[in-house]
């Protein structure tokens, strides 16, 4: 019986730690992708666009929190306050959210498949964000190379 309580406490602790990472990811992603989110306010058709944008934004937040907290390990993730990667993360998050919204909306409108506005942006977000640590490493390695 004592072992089960210990296991539950460990699971609860891990879940709370993950929620902390997701909470801070929500603040970071919302702030850094704000220009794209503002642009999406006026895009039509409003229904599919808003569904795809909400899916892109929420999937991005959960993915960033999961990757940064190493719940899903894809490599060394930049810290929230790391200033040297902030402009890159801002552009990257904006591109992921904007691209996911666009692709999900286009697939829905072309095929008529309703769930495309959820599945397509979610897949794009997770796959694109999983590549961020490698993209940053490559970018910094290239910038240090002598020409």
Image (spheres, rainbow, N blue to C red):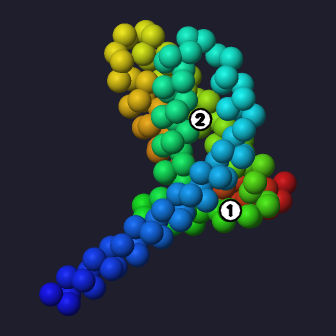
- Residue closer to the observer: 13 or 93: 13
Residue 14: image x %, image y %?
Answer: 40, 72
Please name the residue that numbered disc 2 is placed on: 97
Crowdedness near tag 1: few (<14), some (14–19) or many (≥20) residues, C-alpha within 10 Å? some
Q: Secondary structure at mark 2?
A: helix
Q: Nearer the viewer, residue 131 or 67?
A: 67
The answer to whether residue 8 is left or right of residue 62 is left
Identity of the residue drawn at 20% across and 90% down: 2
Where is residue 51 drawn, in percent x and y? 48, 25
Q: Which residue is painted at 74% across and 64% down in the image?
A: 82
The answer to whether 118 is drawn above or below residue 141 in the figure is above
Question: In the visual, does 5 lie left or right of 109?
Answer: left
Q: Quadrant of residue 8?
A: bottom left
Residue 6: x and y in percent read 27, 85
Residue at the outermost left position: 1
| Tag 1 residue | 80
Q: CA distance from mark 2 to mark 1?
A: 18 Å
Q: Residue furthest right?
A: 147
Vertical arrangement, residue 16 with respect to residue 108, above or below: below
* CB-based contact (under 8 Å), mark 2 and mark 1: no
Percent x, y for residue 101?
A: 55, 27
Q: Residue shown at 73%/64% (left/top)?
A: 81
């Amino acid at each position: 019986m004592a072992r089960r309580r210990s296991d539950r406490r460990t699971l609860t602790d891990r879940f709370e730690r993950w929620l902390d990472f997701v909470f801070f990811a929500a603040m970071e992603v919302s702030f850094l992708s704000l220009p794209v989110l503002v642009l999406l306010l006026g895009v039509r058709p409003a229904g599919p666009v808003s569904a795809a944008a909400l899916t892109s934004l929420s999937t991005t937040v959960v993915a960033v929190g999961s990757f940064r907290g190493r719940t899903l390990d894809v490599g060394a993730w930049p810290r929230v306050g790391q200033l040297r990667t902030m402009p890159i993360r801002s552009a990257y998050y904006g591109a992921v959210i904007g691209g996911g919204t666009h692709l999900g909306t286009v697939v829905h409108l072309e095929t008529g498949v309703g769930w495309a506005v959820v599945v397509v942006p979610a897949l794009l977000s997770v796959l694109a964000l999983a590549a961020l640590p490698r993209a940053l490493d490559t970018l910094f390695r290239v910038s240090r190379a002598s020409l």
